[in-house]
Image (cartoon, helix red, strand yellow):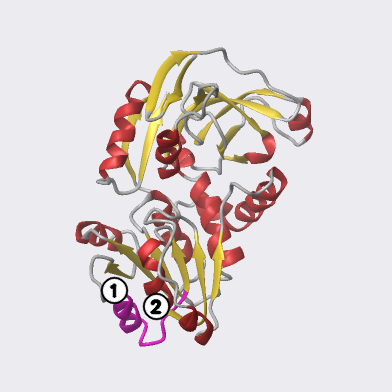
Amino acid sequence: MKVAYVSGRDVLTLADAQVPEAGPKDLVVRVRAAALNRADLGMLAIGLAAGAIPYVAGREFAGEVTAVGPDAAAAGFRSGDGVMAYGIGAFAEFTRLDHRLAMRVPTGLDWHQAAASPLGMQTMHDALVTQGRLSHGERVLVHGASSGMGIQALRMAKALGAGMVIGSSRSETKLQALRKLGMDAGVNLADRAWSKQVRELTGGRGVDVVIDMVTGDTVAGSLAAAAVLGRIVNVGRLGGSAGNFDFDVHALNRLTYVGVTFRTRSTDEIQALIARAERDLGARMSDGSLAIPIDRVFSLAQVVEAHDYMRCNAHLGKILIEP
């Protein structure tokens, strides 16, 4: 089979490899489509530590199960099942993963939507529901709203009953496009008064939940834009890992500031997170209410071009790779 290896810092190599075999807990999956994420760019930029073995790039994918380990079979998985996952080794014709990380493809989803969905579905359900404690009618602000996960957050918040959903971007063109995808209002982070604009849009109250995939210099504005008893969820740090945190505003408005990542979660914790997301969102995935725009599809042979395209930051929605 063909795979895309990370073989050095910012080096991707297309090569041949053996089809993986299923261990006791594993599924082997014929990858039908995979999605490119910002995290993939970050991992590629790090490359390999000294003496490390090249590894297969990509984390998010969907496809058909071709082999099932005994523990996975006991959990109900069978050859031919359609699954989607955020795992490892997605940029390949076949990949292997622990069955506890697999989600069954909801009825009605094609391979493109299935590949584009698992990371955002898991991350944003956790951010909005578990960490953000979103209640019906509350106001939500999503930073980095034009990314695939940002669009999922916007649409998910609406589907879960948010009263107003505001998105942020540094591109007016993208903000206009997001309004057509259900966003109620947008603010441009290039405007220093954006947090005041959020206040005005919410009648002076502020937003109840902030989903922040940018962080960095958005932190101070997010604190200022949040309502009393608001919740800010630090999902990503594309704008930097440090910012101006006003502890007085934090205390005065009795805000909850939560950081999340998959890197320190155990497989069992992720399995529980997946179960919660599937319970609340399965039907909405099937009816198309959480559909994500697919910006562009590359072949596996074009994997380097796909990464270059994401670096340009011109896309709206998800970038996919088909083996």
Is residue 88 rendered magenta in the image?
Answer: no
Residue 167 in which image quadrant: bottom left
Q: Where is residue 317 in the image (x, y as percent from the top left)?
A: 34, 48
Q: What residue type is labelled 1?
A: Trp
Spatial separation of the CA atoms under disc 2 and disc 1: 9 Å
Label at residue 82: none
Q: Residue at x 53, y 83 (%)?
A: 251
The part of the chain drawn in magenta is 195-208
Whether residues under marks 2 and 1 lie with C-beta atoms below 8 angstroms apart, the answer is yes
- Image side of residue 70 versus residue 299, left or right: right
- The location of residue 99, given as percent across then percent down, is 68, 35
Looking at the image, is mark 2 or mark 1 earlier in the sequence? Answer: 1
- Picture layout, residue 126 above or below residue 98: below
**Quick one: 318 or 233, which is closer to the camera?**
233
For numbered disc 2, what is the local secondary structure? helix
* Percent x, y of residue 187: 28, 69
Q: Mark 2 points at which residue?
A: 225
Residue appearing at x 48%, y 83% in the figure = 248
Where disc 1 sits, the SS reads helix
Query: In the rendered structure, which amino acid carries the disc numbered 2?
Result: Ala
The outermost residue toward the front is 50
Q: Which quarter shows the C terminus? A: top left
To which quarter of the image does residue 41 belong? top left
Q: Which residue is drawn at 50% across and 30% down?
A: 90
Image vertical order of residue 20 relative to residue 115, above or below: above
User: Which percent across, then down, holds residue 306?
Assistant: 32, 32
Q: Which of 11 and 73 is in front in this view?
A: 11
192 sits left or right of 77 in the view: left
- Classify residue 319 as left or right of residue 172: right
Would residue 201 be counted in the magenta stretch? yes
Q: Which residue does the numbered mark 1 point to in the structure image?
A: 194
Indicate whether 226 appears above or below 303.
Answer: below
